[in-house]
Image (tube, rainbow, N blue to C red):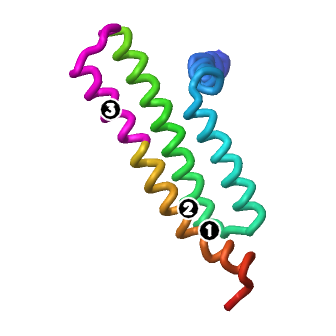
Amino acid sequence: MKFFKMIKSFVPALAGLTFLMKNENNFKFQLVAFFSVLTLGLSVGINRYEWLFTLVCCALVLVAEGINTAIEKLADQIEPSKNPKIKVIKDVSAAAVFLSAIFSLIIGLLIFYPYLKKLFFGSW
């Protein structure tokens, strides 16, 4: 019985994930980026620790986007009209996604640069 209760608890999470994939263009873009990074990682053969950092960074960006969307939807319900205080909340939430993406990009460049350099220019 507990097993079915646990499975049932995943239903709202899957509904939220479905909403993000159907309605949020930024989330769709980030999913494409995620699968592109996975493909690149498999292609160049990054090591276990590089996979760890890569997956954590990808997860961070996707989770941040989900939280940002939830905050935006909640803010729109609380105050449907334009409100400068709500704008600040939305801007800060979007900034969190932006920062997670920038730092993930930097980490990705640090991880993949040596592999790409070797792939395109050989070992100098």
Q: Which residue is mark 3?
A: 91
Task: Assess whether residue 5 is covered by the magenta stretch.
Answer: no
| Residue at which label 2 appears | 108
SS for callout 2: helix
Observer-nearest residue: 46 or 91?
91
User: Furthest-left residue in view?
Assistant: 85
Q: Which residues are magenta?
A: 79-97
Above or below 86: residue 114: below
Work out how far the residue at label 1 is from the one at label 3, CA to CA, in angstroms: 31 Å
Q: Is residue 9 visible?
A: no
User: Residue, x 60% and y 21% (percent of image)?
Assistant: 23
Placement of 75 over or under 40, stated as above or below:
above
Q: Looking at this view, is 63 or 117 the one in front?
A: 117
Residue plotted at (45% across, 38% down): 64
N-term-proximal mark, 2 vs 3 = 3
Quadrant for the C terminus, please. Answer: bottom right
Quick check: marks 2 and 1 in contact, CB under 8 Å?
yes
Q: Which mark is residue 112?
A: 1
- Left or right position of 117 against 78: right
Q: Position of residue 59 (x, y in %)?
A: 54, 45
Q: Earlier in the sequence, mark 1 or mark 3?
A: 3
Residue 65 position, x and y percent, is 48, 34
- Label 2 to label 3, Cα distance in Å? 25 Å
